[in-house]
Amino acid sequence: MTETNSSKSPSLATAPIPGQAPSSTEELNTHLRKDYEHGFTTDVESDTLPPGLNEDVIRHISRMKNEPDFLLEWRLDAYRHWLTQRAPNWAKLNIDPIDYQAISYYSAPKTEKDGPKSLDEVDPKLLETYEKLGIPLAERAALAGVAVDAVFDSVSVATTFKDKLAKEGIIFCSFSEAVQKHPELIKRYLGSVVPTTDNYFASLNSAVFTDGSFVFIPKGVRCPMELSTYFRINAANTGQFERTLIIAEAGSYVSYLEGCTAPQRDENQLHAAVVELIALEDSEIKYSTVQNWYPGDENGVGGIYNFVTKRGDCRGDHSKISWTQVETGSAITWKYPSCLLRGDNSIGEFHSIAVTNHHQQADTGTKMIHLGKNTRSTIVSKGISAGQAQNIYRGLVHMGKNASASRNHTRCDSLLMGDRCGAHTYPYMEVKNPSARVEHEATTSRIGEDQLFYCRQRGISEEDAVSMIVNGFCKEVFRELPMEFAVEAQNLLALSLEGSIG
Amino acid sequence: MLKINNLHVRVGEKTILNGIDLAVKPGEVHAIMGPNGSGKSTLSHVLAGREGYEVIEGEVLYQGNNLLDLSPEARAHAGLFLGFQYPVEIPGVNNMYFLKAAINARRVVQGRNELDAFDFIQMAKTKAKLVGLDESLLQRSVNEGFSGGEKKRNEIFQMAVLEPILAILDETDSGLDIDALRIVAEGVNALRDPERSVILVTHYQRLLDYIVPDYVHVLSEGRIVRSGGRELALTLEEKGYGWLKEKSPHIAPAGPGA
């Protein structure tokens, strides 16, 4: 399907598809049942606030973090606005009501007063956790040339390669540290892409965020390594409210990677992050996410609510922001990494793989807001649905009045496994400039019994065949990931879908 | 090598195969012909282990073992190859990558070392030449966007790479024009070997002009109603399948003997 110019046409493709032999569905479903490998918790003493949310809690967080007054005021404004709002209900998601007073808004592992100065000072149990996740900070980071800012619950516990980066004038640190050391940058840029009033979850995050990452790449600097953050929710009943802010000055380049995992628990946990990217003229930010939060068990019990606002602002001419995401975890995902294409000739990209299995729900996509002249955007979305999961692509392409000669190309593919899952596509297009061009292509396919039989007849086991077919389907997006993460993402995909065919 | 005894198969409530007897020795080429709906494709699929078929009676011995007990991949590892009537497309999966995975899966089961990329590519290029497959197709996604003729040639190429002991070619000639048919047939002929048996399943005798079988069997209503040499195919070509029904309906299958 190719559509040009203005149209609003939600298309819908939902399993079951007829002609499905029940026996192979059964087999698929058996395969789909696969335990979450990262379901362990770390036994460290935590300094946790009692559950509940009010202005005192926010003051407490701000005081614990020794924040300047402007930030406390900013938080309180956000909180007051949040109180006037309601949770959005336009997504195609079934969400049990969330009791915000039952959540604890601050949890930090107890450490020496000043925090660890090097990896040696970090609680070995924390490091062990990272080991289990497959990211031994010290060696692997060095080998892979990745600087890791590891966030354990709310406090950043270790940052590597900071010195090397500092030589280039690059700032890469926890958000809290940036507040202490670079308050002028925080004041200038925080909330300039996602204002405190943007949406319900962004307001909540602005009020109670505890930590996150901060990146600043000075003019003309090409960041010499991939920057990476591993988020992990550990303590029970704590929400995790990350705040990430990345600023690329004129002519600079940075590639940032974010990986997420959470332990297994019966109750749902809330993760409401905000990520803001600012690209000034001729700069480029590449932001990649591998998200593997605990998805809940096969009956839909437990799992992370992942309600995230991510937005990049191509503020300067000829700037570029590209989002790449591999989403395999979370019980519910509500996430639309977006680009504001303000600078003339700026470029926005969104490459996504979203996998849902069992009872997972994902409503995800992007917004490409074309404001400048001759701006370009590309959207490639690959949705994979198995078990009884629902996978929704929702995307907005907006061509503003001044976005002359701007172009968008959207490609949206869905893959269904089994006959109880669903894939839905909701593309929205708003075109206000007659010279702008918008194209949308969508396909829905199924891993067929005949594809599997073909592979097995050639001697390839069913599991290997599924993984091969799925990886083939996702190839275009994997290509966008940095090498070592592409391999990890492929393994993750295979794990998430192991045994699911029909 | 392959011995089918009194095989009865049904799909749902419908019985498709009504007592098939067939014996194939090493190096022999058997053609199985028959009108649409006679059970030809069912026989191919049951031998390869496709789901959805229920064997209600009879047995299939392959190299002395009970073939029907094996999973499809185990049959492949034991050297059974099915050339598909409709080869399946697998978008995004490189043809070479796919075949390397296939050949190495078998080698692992056999306790042999996996082929490395270099050795595999050398071997694959040689085989591509042998069956007349354009090398550019090797790097494309499995069967994606291939023409009908290219898909069939790719099947024969896979057969050449996997070096089966028993190859079942299901309607390999369907949908091919005469030039493509000749190229595919030459590929199969190049792979004839005293240790390799071939079962050609076909509706038309024209394939047998190019691949000369040792035996021809005619399948009708789930049963082999007649067996003979190559001339049987020519008689069928001349008189049509209706001719068999006019004749005495049951002639003991004169199998080539086991």
Image (spheres, coloured by chain):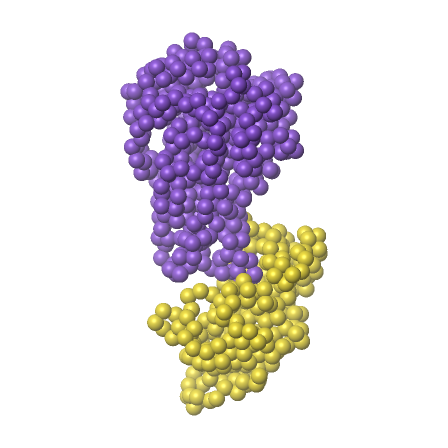
Chain colours: A purple, B yellow
Looking at the image, the residue that sits furthest to the top is A69
Q: Position of residue A201 (x, y in %)?
A: 37, 26
Could you say which quadrant of the image residue A208 lies in?
A: top left
Pick the front one: A479 or A160: A160
Q: Quadrant of the C terminus of chain B?
A: bottom right
Q: Position of residue A365 (x, y in %)?
A: 42, 35
In the displayed structure image, the side of residue B96 where residue A300 appears, left or right = left
Could you say which quadrant of the image residue A227 lies in?
A: top right
Residue located at (50% from left, 14% from top):
A179
Residue located at (46% from left, 89% from top):
B251
Counting labels gives 0
Q: Quadrant of the N terminus of chain B?
A: bottom right
Residue located at (41% from left, 75% from top):
B56
Residue A181 in view: yes
Q: Position of residue A25 (x, y in %)?
A: 40, 56
In the displayed structure image, the side of residue A230 where residue A6 appears, left or right = left
Pick the front one: A2 or A293: A293
Q: Position of residue B33 (x, y in %)?
A: 50, 77
Residue A196 in view: no
Residue located at (51% from left, 78% from top):
B4
